[in-house]
Amino acid sequence: MHPMTSAPYLVRSRRPDRADTVTLALKPVEGPCPPFLPGQFTMIYAPGVGEIPVSISGRARSGGYVQTIRAVGAVSGALCRTRRGDVVGVRGPYGTAWDLSAAAGLDVVVAAGGLGLAPLRPVIRELAAHGSRYGRISLIVGTRTPATLIYPGELARWRDRDGIDVQVTVDHPDLAWKGPVGLVTRLIDRIVFEPRRTFAFVCGPEIMMRATAAELVRRGVSAARVMLSVERDMKCGVGRCGHCQLGPLLTCLDGPVLSYERAAGLLAVREL
Amino acid sequence: MNAVVTESLEPLIAGLRSRGFTVVGPTTRDGAVRFAEISCAAQLPAGRGDEQQPGRYRLTERHDALVFGFAASPDSAKRYTQPPRQSLFRMREGTVEEAEAEAPRIALLGVRACDLAAIAVQDRVFLGGRHPDPAYRKRREAMLLIAVNCAVPGGTCFCVSMGTGPKATAGFDLALTELSDPHRFLIETGSGRGAEIVTTISHRPATGDDISAAEEISRVAATRMGRQVDTDGIQERLAGAHDSPRWAEVASRCLACTNCTMVCPTCFCTTVEDSSDFTGGVAERTEVWDSCFTLDFSEVGGSSVRGSGSARYRQWLTHKFSTWFDQFGMSGCVGCGRCITWCPTGIDVTEELGCIL
């Protein structure tokens, strides 16, 4: 099959996630769903509208992919408006993965900005399920407003049931908000980790990832142990459209997950 | 050298056509040499030459009967290896129909050494990675390549700098060198398919004089490059030149018109277009050539990563001469000079490299 040909997938369930975000469970119309590694993405096609890369946020109970999409453009808007039983196209999974085995035995810091929590969800679920393999586990989350926070129920479960230190900050509080206000980097002061024995997974807007990674490294975490997920425009996901270049990297093949050691120099160049 | 000589290309063209090949060769149209289907040797641009300079292309009259007396034309083999527009698939309810991959039996006549190098670059891009393109493979396998060794390089050529020409050394089925006094063609074979075709046309074995005349043409052509580039350490030197003030200077002249990328024989970037019928029941995806000079090429979350012209020019030039090595293990530039000739403001990539490095 041509690498640009989508396979038809059924929307098995659609769960609105607060304001403008939905979580879809997608399952192939025929045959099994290819396995994925946490951090990988698929290309999801809204028929007649277009296709976008979306990170996989989990495996559905029915055997398909769970993917969380925020309506920001025509394609994501169309995907967010799909209903149960609709057919979309899916290709993948593609790209590099979060390396959980490298975090074994170490303190783990997971830092998410906005929708960046979605690609980290499989990481957190793994940490929650096998907490004894890791040291202290912290999850820090920044979001625009309390209403844009995704997975609030799961965040509470990870904190209350799984013993993960979960901290959330918002840019713009509402009247009911009693938690921290400001950038996610400010939460680093509120969590406990031994920098020289820490592994970090960071996902969010590029400016948030740069600031968070730089702060972790400043505190002594090795840049090789800070992983980021880089976002770039993609039309193919398979290294043939050219859109996702970040200097020498084709983000679709060499990313999206990169170590800060590799990404720092590239992210420091304006408009690369 | 295993070579033969023929006085006319007529039997070759007729032989290819009788074997079911569509023969595509140079013709003159719209004031330029353009590839088009030909049915006889008389359609080749006999006695026509060209003048190429930054931002300038003119057809000229030659004072001889050479049919390949011109340099690289705006069309390259890319038009046939990677069509400008191709349907990918149609989706109807829960079913997907793949477009029938077109693999016409094309004999491309008049391919230059730089363009053979460009095809090798495309092979690496489309077949060399983790996700090979079966449609590209089919087109390539169905294509017969008849090279022509350059006799008259253009004013914007620099294939010698890039190590890709002017003589075709690999990747062809047949390679011609056009000789004068008397007018004749030396034919080298580069594949079994090429050798088999040669057996069907009238020819005589090449003499030592034929071969040395052909060698002289390639030797002289190599000394007549209009441009040159110092490629020593170019990958590393460019990778360290992100902050050059020259990017802003060249951006002040660049119209971001995308011409350089459209005429480039290796630029492979594409985008996709989506359409559906009036009922919305059938959706079709089409892949079309795209260019990193467009503002929406690098759009993320509603704004362009490379919003400035200087960043877009830097992306293009750095990709060609530096990051292409990181991605594909080879240069993305083959020195054909088309981007210089067809730039409406005459931006000269060799001059820019000289200033930046």
Image (spheres, coloured by chain):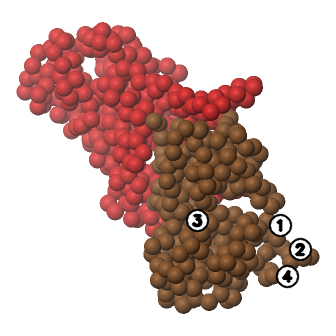
Chain colours: A brown, B red
Q: Residues within 10 Å of mark 4 (few under 14, many from 20)?
A: few
Tag 2 subunit: A
Q: B218 or B9: nearer the eye? A: B9
| Circles 1 and 3 in contact, beta carbons < 8 Å | no
Q: Position of residue A97 (x, y in %)?
A: 50, 63
Q: Which mark is residue A122?
A: 3
Q: Amino acid at mark 2?
A: Asp
Q: Is residue A191 among the parts visible in the rendering?
A: yes
Q: Is residue B110 among the parts visible in the rendering?
A: no
| Circles 1 and 2 in contact, beta carbons < 8 Å | yes
Q: Considering the numbered disc 3 on the image, is that residue within a helix, a strand or a loop?
A: helix
Q: Are marks 3 and 4 on the same chain?
A: yes
Q: Are marks 3 and 2 on the same chain?
A: yes
Instruction: Tell me the mark number nearer the camera, choosing from 4 and 2.
Output: 4
Residue shown at 38% from the left, 52% from the top = B328
Looking at the rendering, in which quadrant would you find the C terminus of chain B? Answer: bottom left
> Residue under circle 2?
A174
| Circles 4 and 1 in contact, beta carbons < 8 Å | no
> Residue under circle 1?
A147
Q: Mark 1 or mark 4, which is nearer the start of the sequence?
A: 1
Q: Considering the numbered disc 1 on the image, is that residue within a helix, a strand or a loop?
A: helix
Instruction: Tell me the mark number nearer the camera, choosing from 3 and 4.
Output: 3
Q: Considering the numbered disc 2 on the image, is that residue within a helix, a strand or a loop?
A: loop
Q: B78 or B224: nearer the eye? A: B78
Whole-angstrom CA distance, mark 4 to mark 2, is 9 Å
Q: Considering the numbered disc 4 on the image, is that residue within a helix, a strand or a loop?
A: loop
